[in-house]
Image (cartoon, grey):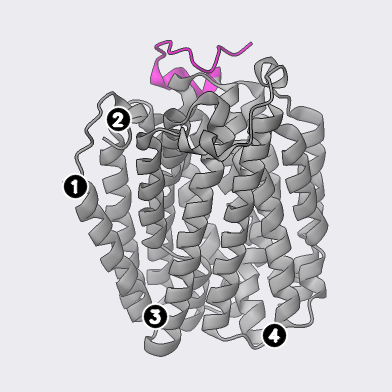
Amino acid sequence: MQAPAGQDEPVPLRSGYRRLPGGIWALGLVSMLMDVSSELIHSLLPVFLGTVLGASMLTIGVIEGSAEAIAAFMRVFSGVYSDYLGRRKPLLVLGYGLAAVTKPLFPLAATIGWVFTARCVDRIGKGIRGAPRDALVADLVPRHLRGAAYGLRQALDTLGALLGPLLALVCMVLLADDIRAVLWLAVVPAVLAVAVLLAAVREPAATLSGKRGALAPARVRSLPPRFWRVVALGAVFTLARFSEAFLILRAQEVGLAIGYVPLIMVVMNAVYAVCAYPAGALADVLSPRRLLLAGLGVLIAADALLAVAGTPLQTFGGAALWGLHMALTQGLLAKLVADTAPDDLRGTAFGIFNLVSGAALLLASVIAGALWQTRGAVATFGAGALFAAAAAGGLLLYRPGARGGAAAGPG
């Protein structure tokens, strides 16, 4: 059995992944399978919208940003409700199940509106499962292994995000660039993800026997100031980057053949998958500020390279740096949320964090789409680099009043 979530028992860094409970591995496998499905679609959807359905760059930015914002909005309600129930798994099953059901809508889409609806419903499923899943990770492991646990789940999730575009690439070649036919393949891994979730994921006894909490707004106001600092930090990081759809569009713009466009997501997610667990494990022992600053530095380099890119090879380099940025920051931010929120408000905390981050992603993606349409890709990625640089400057100037590691915020 795993140690209680609040127990702080010293452990060698090298033994972290071997000490993680089976539930973390099962959640990672579920995430991997669903990401194979989702990223297979996502790696082709911008091209499908632009070439088959005739959508503008601004429209693509609105669709991508709106879909992610809807997901973030749903996470608040699912996070609060999972705290109220003292249960996480029912909401996970609902969220993953809804996402699986929507997968056939993409190859059937005949209009932009249809794709928009399918994308939003799919993201509703993601929103329902997101906060309870992140809270369940923290429920399953002690504090000293949370960075490793989030890193491992993210690594497996990103492995799926790597395999999805790779599968899309192979199938586009085999099926002579028939995008609709390739999109149908996304249904299979989505169904498998739900099956694994039902069979292999178990909630800890402490969660199952927990008492229901109140749904009063006062409980949200009881979240500590250090949590709200993490929320603000997550929003700033999200504003500094926008939807990965623009990486795909950039590769196509510099001459990468349509059948090979998914390679951009393969490269990005390969780096993300390889680096996510080591970065998460480092978050258990190093200063959060250093890792966050490193992540912003890498994002600035990625945006700069993508802004000046004139060949597909340069866009691959930018995508690789983008993946490294994600590995350095996403698991760490999840750990900071878990460490700064009370146990009985953990689902609520993740929901609020993801709502704010989703709103920031919507704004960032709409701005990116508008910049691209009016001033081109150079302005889009240049603006991203400038915002990341401003965020890094703010983080350097920030001096938290509390001390005590991650629990005190990004000190």
Q: Residue at x 51, y 38 (%)?
A: 220
Magenta-drawn stretch contains 7: yes
Question: Which numbered tag is attached to residue 52?
Answer: 4
Please tell me whether mark 2 or mark 1 is closer to you in this view.
1
The crowd level at tag 4 (other Cα within 10 Å; few <14, some 14-19, many 20+) is some
Q: Which residues are magenta?
A: 1-19
Look at the numbered disc 2 and give the secondary structure of its residue. loop
Residue 303's quadrant in the figure?
bottom left
Please tell me whether mark 3 or mark 1 is closer to you in this view.
1
Measuring from the top left, give residue 255's x and y in whole percent.
48, 82
Q: Disc 2 residue type?
A: Leu
First-in-chain label (3 vs 1): 3
Q: Disc 3 residue type?
A: Ala
Q: Disc 4 and disc 3: Cα gap in Å?
A: 21 Å
First-in-chain label (4 vs 3): 4
Question: Which numbered tag is attached to residue 286?
Answer: 2
Look at the numbered disc 3 and give the secondary structure of its residue. helix
User: Could you tell me what secondary structure mostly forms the magenta stretch?
Assistant: loop
Measuring from the top left, give residue 257's x and y in whole percent.
56, 79
Residue 140's quadrant in the figure?
top right
Question: Which numbered tag is attached to residue 377?
Answer: 3
Magenta-drawn stretch contains 129: no
User: Looking at the figure, which quarter contains the C terminus?
Assistant: top left
